[in-house]
Amino acid sequence: MGAIGPWQIIIILVIALLLFGGGGRISSMMGDFAKGIKSFRKGLQEDDEKALSDPSDSAVDVTPAKDDAKSGTNAD
C-alpha cells in the first residue's frame, strides 16, 4: 500500500515535464522564479558582507539631547 507504482511514477514525470521542461509558459515561469530566488539570496549575502565590513553604520547614538524646555524651567 505504501509502495509507489508505475502510474504514480508516470504522473510525477508528467508534472515534472510540465513544470521544468517542454519550453512552455510554465517552464519559463519556473525559470524566472528560480532567478528571483537566486537574486534574493545574492542580495542577502551582499547585505551581510556590508554589515560585517562596516560595523560603524550599525551603531547609532539614540541618547536624547538635553533640552531646557523639557527640564521644567520656564524662561518667561
Image (cartoon, rainbow, N blue to C red):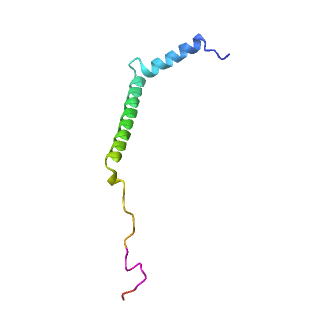
Q: In which quadrant of the rendered view does residue 3 lie?
A: top right
Q: In which quarter of the image is the C terminus?
A: bottom left
User: Does the magenta-highlighted stretch encompass residue 8?
Assistant: no
x%, y% of residue 23? 38, 19
Asked whether 6 or 69 is in front, the reply is 69
Give the residue at x 39% y 86%.
74
Q: What stretch is highlighted in magenta?
A: 66-73
Q: In which quarter of the image is the N terminus?
A: top right
Pinpoint residue 51: horizontal percent, then vertical percent: 35, 47
Going 61% across and 14% down the picture, which residue do you hit?
4
In this view, the residue farthest toward the top is 6
Q: Which of 36 and 46 is in front in this view?
A: 46
Q: Outermost residue toward the bottom?
A: 76
Query: How many numbered marks does the figure carry?
Result: 0
Query: What residue is drawn where x is 35% and y is 36%?
Result: 42
Please tell me whether the stretch drawn in magenta is mainly helix, strand or loop: loop
**Where 13 sits versus 74, above or below?**
above
Q: Is residue 53 left or right of residue 9?
A: left
Where 37 sits versus 27, above or below?
below
Q: Quadrant of residue 43?
A: top left
Residue 68 in percent (x, y) is at 37, 80
Closest to the observer: 52 or 2? Answer: 52
Q: Residue at x 53, y 17 (%)?
A: 12
